[in-house]
Amino acid sequence: MSTPSPLLEVRDLVARHALPGAPAWGGLLNRRRWLQAVDGVSFTLARGEAVGLVGESGCGKSTLVSLLARLSDPVSGRIVFDGIELSGQPAARAARSPWRHRVQMVFQDPHDSLDPRRTAFDAIAEPLRSADGQRALKGDALRRRVLEVAQRVQLGADLLQRRPHELSGGQAARVGIARALAPGPELLILDEPTAALDVSVQAGVLALLDRLRRELGLAILFVSHDLGVVRLLCERVLVMREGRIVDQGPARELLDSPRHAYTAALAAAIPKFPERAPHA
Amino acid sequence: MKPQHFRAAPGLLLLALFLLAALFGPALAPFDPLATDMLARLQPPGATHWFGTDALGRDLFSRVLVATRLDLGMAAGAVVLSLLAGSAIGAWCGFAGGRLDRWTGRLVDVLMAFPLFVVAMALVAAWGNSVANIVYATALINLPFYIRLARSEVGVRRNAGYVHAARLGGATATRLLFGVLLPHVLPMLAVQGSINLGWALLNGAGLSFIGLGVRPPTAEWGVLVSEGAPYIITGQWWLAFFPGLALFAAVGCFTLLGDALRDLLDPRGAAEAARP
Amino acid sequence: MTAPMLEVEGLTLRFRTPTGLVNVLDRVGFTLQAGETLGLVGESGSGKSVTALALAGLLDARAQTQARALRFQGRSLLDSRGEPDTAAWQGLRGRRIGFVFQSPRRALHPLRTIGDQLQQVLQVHRGLKASAARQEALAWIERVGLSEPARRFKAHAHELSGGQCQRVMIALALAGEPELLIADEPTTGLDVSTQARVLDLIAALARERRLATLLITHDLALAAQRCARIAVMHAGQLVETLPSRGLRDGAAHPYTRQLLRATPQSAATLGDLRSVHGVLPDLTRTDLPACRFAERCDRADARCHAQAAPRTRLTGPHALACWHPVQFVHPPLPIAA
């Protein structure tokens, strides 16, 4: 029996950042300088699988994630989602593509990724309103869908009329998740979604994500620098360093008994509870 | 909200008065602003002529009142034109980024390096004396302010998380610009516009004062001040004083309103900035 | 015997706000010895940062602070009314007590160079002349592990990464050669590796200088690893103080146990992870239960709502305030109130 084709396949992806230019000719011209942010990344993601992407700040995780969500363009390489060549089209035209609703993202800082002038309801409704053609919802259908999604993420309906600054960190995070779920995606990319949350709120959000994955059959790509969290939520882990995937494997195994030196270093950096000294 | 309401009160009151004068001026004027009466020339303010009369016996109060419509009309026209055009250009540049944005920014900086009133003078002199030309010239010299404002407000927010999130939802560039970013820029534009009304007013009056644009016998505050200026030395102070007072009050009113608007919109801004 | 570095007893804090009085802190008390690291943990909003600000005397006029005792190296910092003596604090801040804040980039002056800011601290708090201050500033930049000190001296905050900014903050805090360091969530926003490096740096410098450190964090595992003792706060009340060794087995207060269950490092699988029940109580309420955890606790009864449990010592370094602790090793001995 053959294994089903992966939901997401990334092949030799390369992307770069423009660095602040190096002035030349006494400052009249700016010579472009580039930083190789993603340097030949390849991996696959199966339907309904939870994969973690870990690495330190600056390793290229956020750039990679932006590429996968098609918010920016790679220099070279392929991104294939359910057989569709995502990298074929420039990011600027991604908004109107038929697959747009199938790949969604949850951002790191909910207070930055929610429009401060709009209510939670509007934030969740936005993707439904701006969807292409038939998928766009309005009126009652819109309202029902928003309430449905809000309930799924355990966000009380009374909170929907609030603006982001009136919501707690955990509530705002849930709005971000609801917004990503509203269009009914198959792949959910989460960029450090719990980094700004305290430990108890984080526990709630992780439990929610796991439940959503099982209920909706979502595939999850969870980006984090916190291996402790990734170890619990994800089945497989990719370790990224300086634009490359340097290690990958089953989460538990990789983090409890790492073989690669860098992975071991990352695992060692996780704070651990000191054990009780043997009783005198 | 209370303190903000109190601060807006004087401005709103004045605005109401001016709007009344602008809309119903000609009907409310006790005398025909153009009617001369050589027997009643250069009379100081009194019971019949509240602001006195000028060198041709025309009632100053009527002239000042009727001029309201012209002055406010010119100022409003200029501001509306420059606001619409400027914010459209600025928003587009701020959103597009890249070379277009950079070069537009430099162009605006160059424009703003000129003494703008002189530019307005040159334009009206070149295009000819007319109310329309005053409006266009004033609009043009105010354009850079709106371009700059819209460009920076949009540019700063272009990479905000919620803009990216909107793109993920399927928002096209148009929707992003008008639906997501513009509502953020509008409050700033409104405040700038309100304060700008004061400048535009002074601009139009200033051009008329030096003889460009509106010519006598048309009643316009700048023209009235220029007619009344030589008489200050001879003691007929009211001729320049009352039109000047009208200008002062109008500019003050718009500035107060601009400040009040900004305070009104600031609490939300302050809440925006308050991170948990 | 030398006096403890810091003694806090009965610290109560209320904020006057347009909507009412907020009872932020309720009789918080703890002791910190010289050279010791104490971790102050609790959820966001439990009053940890506010405690630090209160200790620093950095709260504004809306804050009504009262304490039974507040002593720094045996010297009282309260005036005759039991309120903090701002003049006394002024002398200590920066010089004898150093602070490291959250959001390092925001805490640094955006328009002045790093070197400038360091130099100022040295000139003001150590009385060095400009040239000597400059030399010392360069030395500090190197000491906190930043490469190319001369170049960094001229850099501005926005040119540095989060981890680098935090190192600068540490330098700023320690340049005055304080005896007590208060670090409020110094590693939030930094990745695990940088976090480890920053905390290693603080630990190394603390050891060198016999610094007492108060580390404030919401991450229980982090506090347990880095501190000898932990003080757990909930909704402005200090519920338990215990050694970090064996915290997992020894924690007796129900809140500490719930916090433990929410920490990923204590969970074997995702199913083991549980967030703390309910939410922090609204501190503007006038009907708050005596134990503010009572409404979230599965062991609470009427007594918990009505009467505040006295602070009881279970073993030498382990004390808690609870009528129904989860387990205790030795019979409880009440501490003199």
Image (cartoon, rainbow, N blue to C red):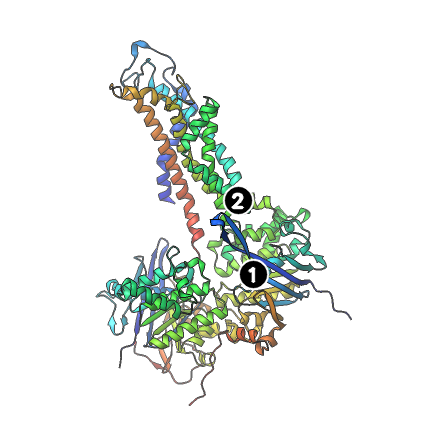
Amino acid of disc 2: Asp
- Marks 2/1 in contact by CB < 8 Å: the verdict is no
Quadrant of the image for the C terminus of chain B?
A: bottom left
- Expressed as whole percent of the image width and height from the top left, the position of residue A264 reads 55, 76
Where B245 sits versus A181, above or below?
above
Q: Residue furthest right?
A: A1
> Regarding mark 1 in the picture, which secondary structure is present there?
helix
- Expressed as whole percent of the image width and height from the top left, the position of residue B46 reads 27, 18
- Is residue B96 or residue B110 the one in the foreground? B110
Q: Residue furthest top?
A: B39
Disc 1 packing (10 Å; few <14; some 14–19; many ≥20): some
Residue B251: quarter of image: top left
Amino acid of disc 1: Ser
- Expressed as whole percent of the image width and height from the top left, the position of residue B237 reads 27, 21
Pointer 1: what residue? A62
- The chain holding disc 1 is A
Where A85 sits versus C278, above or below?
above
- Expressed as whole percent of the image width and height from the top left, the position of residue A149 reads 60, 57
Pointer 2: what residue? B101
- The chain holding disc 2 is B
Figure label count: 2
> Regarding mark 2 in the picture, which secondary structure is present there?
helix
Residue at 61% x, 58% y is A67
User: CA separation, marks 2 and 1?
Assistant: 26 Å
Where B24 sits versus C232, above or below?
above
Quadrant of the image for the N terminus of chain B?
A: top left
Which callout, 2 or 1, points to the residue nearer the camera?
2
